[in-house]
Image (cartoon, coloured by chain):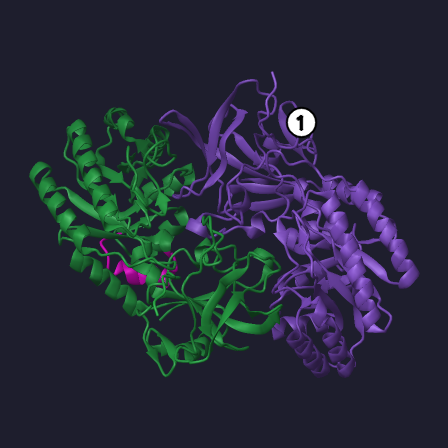
Chain colours: A green, B purple
Amino acid sequence: MSTTKPVHAEMTQFAVDGGELQVGGVPLTRLAQRVGRTPFYAYDRALLTARVGHVRAHLPAPLRLHYSVKANPMPALVQHMATLVDGLDVASAGELRTALDTGFDPAHVSFAGPGKTDAELTQAIAAGVTLNAESPHEIGRAARIGDALGIAPRIVLRVNPDFELKGSGMRMGGGAKPFGIDAEQVPDCLRQLAALGIALQGFHIFSGSQSLKAEAIAESHARSVELALQLAGAARQPLPALYLGAGFGIPYFPGEQRLDLAPIGDNLAHWLARIDAELPGMRVSVESGRYLVGEAGVYVARVIDRKVSRGQVFLVTDGGLHHHLAASGNFGQVIRKNYPVAVGNRMAAEARETVSVVGPLCTPLDVLAERMDLARADVGDLVVVFQSGAYGLSASPTAFLGHPAPLEVLV
Amino acid sequence: MSTTKPVHAEMTQFAVDGGELQVGGVPLTRLAQRVGRTPFYAYDRALLTARVGHVRAHLPAPLRLHYSVKANPMPALVQHMATLVDGLDVASAGELRTALDTGFDPAHVSFAGPGKTDAELTQAIAAGVTLNAESPHEIGRAARIGDALGIAPRIVLRVNPDFELKGSGMRMGGGAKPFGIDAEQVPDCLRQLAALGIALQGFHIFSGSQSLKAEAIAESHARSVELALQLAGAARQPLPALYLGAGFGIPYFPGEQRLDLAPIGDNLAHWLARIDAELPGMRVSVESGRYLVGEAGVYVARVIDRKVSRGQVFLVTDGGLHHHLAASGNFGQVIRKNYPVAVGNRMAAEARETVSVVGPLCTPLDVLAERMDLARADVGDLVVVFQSGAYGLSASPTAFLGHPAPLEVLV
């Protein structure tokens, strides 16, 4: 019997043993005991390491890999990622502090964000990190603050390209945007930098993220490099670096498949050769957040009540929207779809049923799974939401309705 | 010349003087200096008092008015509300602590929520507050914990009615729901309570919230009272109390108008008379959160950059989605619409322009106003988001991208 109903990509990154999901090699029930309370997020250290290895194996060797801290700023996780990648990208003074705490070379930390305050610019310049400048006004402020501090600011121009990453979950470039400097305004900014006596460190071109289409990503990389080559011609000076958004997505919803990096790597190898010929010595980096950490994390909540309302089974857990807004379907999603979910201590159970998993909040938005086929669960069981390693806890309204914040562990 | 383009309801609750919005009688620029940094939320104490007075003036006098703390749990605000209302409703142990800190009589504090943990039930029973029981399983746990503590739990049955509040922003009743006990299961729960020797304190019937349709609200109140009378017949014991969800909404989006409470009050007066005849002595309370506090608050952010990208003007502020998720359009909204927004220190400016107001985050979701007609603003100006007194800060992912949390003041 065949069915065309779309299903989730298989969550085989975590082993199962004795019916228990294993996170970092620890059975889930044991892990919950060790954490001491539910709900919690758990990130698998070995999976993080393996994922960076996977990316490096598919991308050309000279390419540098940066981790975007905003995807998951848990300090222990950032510390681990810092041992694996070539650069850290931060989006606030808070993330900057986390990045510097790892001992990372500030020259390989970059700070992007369209609304940097004077205080943030001061901290970044004092730390010696690279600023991704987002506007002529910001360049002027950075120059003035650099003068006051007696430190030349390290400035990369963030370019708003005239194209976007097709089919991406988040479009960050193309058209009118608050991010970066429109490509056609870059020559003016180059003159501004020259007048201020600031040496340009490079370009940052980011056209979108969370794409599962290798072809669209390859095309956006190609167009980004073409744009960089063209802008470099206008710059009439050596350009130390080019920063590209990776754009790599992970599968969340039924019907989505994992991205094949091979054609993306082949395409980048072609363009690196072209860069070597035209702009020898320029370092090229790709920045990725979600792809590096998203699949290595789970969110775990305990079943508090099991109730049947008018024929429908609800598992009421101690976790929900306040801890995992994206999984509840309320973070930038137009139509709510289920994340992959399982009962982590009943992975081998034969008895199954269609249930909705909800949280403890008095709002119909507080849903972790809507009418999913899960192992039959009862009070005390542990519900697991997969694909929760990126934009999970930090993207959630933890104070909503006054429940305790969840814990995070790196296992 | 006429236009059919829908507009926002007028935000006349705040006075304007010398071109400055006044919050609690303080000009906005002065208030920002006093708070010491932006962004911040400011709530107007006099507007809160006036709003409770407005509700009491329109609802029949014997009706009791409860404040739902979840709408805005800022301690100073809850303390003020506690001086105005007859009861406080909480949704977690955190809100319970805030409510008890005001010195409120625990007998008039009630605790609702579909996933109460044993720890929360213990705290609530120890405090002597009323529990809105959501399932037979929860009743059993409350009884066991009450036995252990030597305190009889005060239990109200939360009933999932067989109808819902039509046209409401949040449907909380009708159909299969995780909230409360299906009306048809109530007789079983009454037998369960009798067997446990627990005296029922009453019923809680809540069919939805954020409705701007007086007729729909009146109908839901009527059906709730009818259901309560019918269930009371089955209870065969005196029922001390009935708790009704108010369902009152406030206007957020273009085209929405303020609710007229007069027909709602007339309708409730009719039903109170009926209750007095059939169930003399029963206290009837209505619970409201958003309606009491939502219009009394503003969110204030400062313009950090003003940029033009491909013909479109962007005001980049230090505030955004991370502080005010609902205003960004990412909290349970299908189609993003603008909240009412103004430039609070240029309320009398003649120069106007169409701009988008965005935040400092590297995500296209971080929008406070999309292509709105506002006073022409520049760096340093203060953007105000109205209708921000409920479900603002506490419903926002403040840790997202690592920026500092906003402050809150009650003026």
Could you tell me residue B407's position as x and y percent?
57, 46
Q: Quadrant of residue A172?
A: top left
- Secondary structure of the residue carrying tag 1 is strand
In the image, is residue A198 above or below residue A315? above
Q: Residue at x 69, y 61 (%)?
A: B162
Could you tell me residue B105's position as x and y percent?
79, 62
Could you tell me residue B214's position as x and y percent?
74, 43
In the image, is residue B27 above or below residue A72? above
Q: Quadrant of the N terminus of chain B?
A: top right
Give the magenta range.
Answer: A72-87
Q: Quadrant of residue B30?
A: top right
Q: Residue at x 67, y 51 (%)?
A: B209
Q: Nearer the viewer, residue A119 or A160?
A: A160
Q: Amino acid at mark 1?
A: Val
**What chain does mark 1 sit on?**
B
Q: Does residue A83 belong to the magenta stretch?
A: yes
Q: Nearer the viewer, residue B252 or A140?
A: B252
* Residue with the most extreme top position: B1
Q: Is residue B315 visible?
A: yes
Compared across the picture, whether A146 is left or right of B92 comes to left
Q: Quadrant of the C terminus of chain B?
A: top right
Q: Is residue B406 visible?
A: no
Compared across the picture, whether B170 is left or right of B157 comes to left
Residue matched to label 1 = B16
Compared across the picture, whether B38 is left or right of B229 comes to left
Q: How many marks?
A: 1
